[in-house]
Amino acid sequence: MLIDAHNHPNWHGHDSKKILENMDEHGIDQLWLFTWEVSDDEYPPSYHKVLPPTGLGIPLEDVISVGKEAPDRFVMGYMPHPKRPDAIDRLKAAVEIHGIRVASELKVRVTFDDPDAIRLYHFCGEEGLPVTIHLDYPIDRGRDYPRPNWWYGGSLDAFERAIVECPNTIFIGHAPGFWAHISGDDRAFTDSYPRGKVKPGGRVPQMLRKYPNLFADLSAGSGLTAISRDRKFGKKFLTEFQNKLIFGRDDFNSLLMDYLKSLNLSKIAFEKITYKNALKLLGECAD
C-alpha cells in the first residue's frame, strides 16, 4: 500500500481526473487532499501560475468536489484561517457534513502560538484531527512582489510553544522553515533550502524525540532536500524516526519515492513511512 499524505486539488493543473490518473501511474492507493485558506494580503501573486486564477488559495469546495469523485481513495482535509471568528464552527461543520478527517494545511501569516490558533488546535485535538503546518521564514528573495518575503507561521519557536500548549493535538511539521532545522546551524534564517552536510544538534530531530504529538511530512522539495543533502545522515534519520515520518508529495512526481527506494531502508521502516504511520494518524489499523 502507498499513501500520499500531502496534496491538493487543482494544484499544478491537476483536476480530479488527472489526480486519479497520476495516482494509478505512481501506485498510490490513497491521497490526502488539503485546503489552503488564505486572505488576499497573505497570498503571493506567484501562486497564480500553479492555482486557478479564479480565487485565492485552495478552498474547501475544491477539496469536496475532487474528494467525492473517489471517496474510497481520498482523505479530505480542511483548515480554516485561525483569525476567522467562526473558525471552529466552520471546521466542526466540515467534519460533520463532509467527513473532513485532517486539519490541513495551516499556511497563514499568523504565529503558530497565536491565542486564536491555540484555541483552534485544542478543538482539533478533541476531534482527533491531525494538523499539518507550513513554516516559512521571512527570507528576502528579492523577487516576490509586492512583499519582499512571504513568511508563514512565525518561527520554529512559536511552533514548539504550540506543541507544548496542545499535547493532545497531533502536529505534522512541513515546509522549508521546518525542514531547514534538520541541521544544527542557523541557515534556516537565511536559506529556504540549505544543502551540504547536516551538522549535529538539529532542532527537528530534537523535537521529534521530545514530543510524542509531533510528526513530520516528507513532502515537497523541502522534505526531500532535508533527507538527501547528506545521504548518510538522511538514512539514519529515516531509520531513527520511522515511527514519526509520513510520505507525501505536495506535487505529482516520483522524486521522493525514487530517493527512498535508493536508500534500501528496512521493509519495516519503509512501510511505516509510506503508509502505516498515516493510517495510524487516522485511527486506522496499519497491520
Image (tube, rainbow, N blue to C red):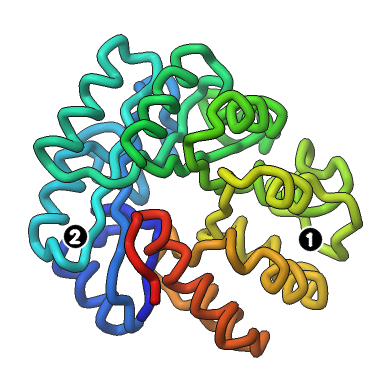
Q: Position of residue 76 (x, y in %)?
A: 24, 50
Mark 2, residue position: 15
Q: Amino acid at mark 2?
A: Asp
Find residue 230 and report its image quarter. bottom right
Nearer to us in this view, 202 or 188: 202
Amino acid bearing label 1? Arg
**Percent from the top left, x then y, of residue 255?**
52, 76
Residue 148 in sight: no
Q: Can residue 49 be seen from the camera position used here?
A: yes
> What is the distance, in whole Å, between disc 1 and disc 2 at their CAs?
33 Å
Please, what secondary structure does the residue beneath circle 2 have? loop
Report the disc number at residue 195: 1
Return the residue nearer the eye: 114 or 219: 114
Q: Name the image quarter holding residue 266.
A: bottom right
Q: In which quadrant will I find the N terminus? A: bottom left
Categorize mark 2 by other alpha carbons within 10 Å: few (<14), some (14-19), many (20+). some
Label 1 element class: loop
1 or 2: tag closer to the N-terminus: 2
Answer with left or right where residue 286 lies relative to residue 154.
left
In the image, what residue occupies the spot 47% across and 36% down?
169
Instruction: Specify the quadrant of the image occupied by residue 59.
Output: top left
Query: Alpha-carbon neighbours of circle 1 within 10 Å: few (<14), some, or many (≥20)?
Result: some
Q: Position of residue 43 (x, y in %)?
A: 41, 29
- The quadrant in which the C terminus is found is bottom left
Q: What residue lies at 20% left-to-right and 37% top-to-bottom?
A: 95
User: Is 57 left or right of 277, judged from the image as shown?
Assistant: left
The dot on residue 205 is none
Q: Are the residues flagged by discs 1 and 2 in contact, CB closer than 8 Å? A: no
Front residue of 167/68: it is 167
Q: Where is 235 relative to 172, above or below? A: below
- Residue 242 x/y as whole percent: 62, 68
Q: Please report the residue visible at 52 percent of the width from the left and 59 percent of the height from the top.
A: 220
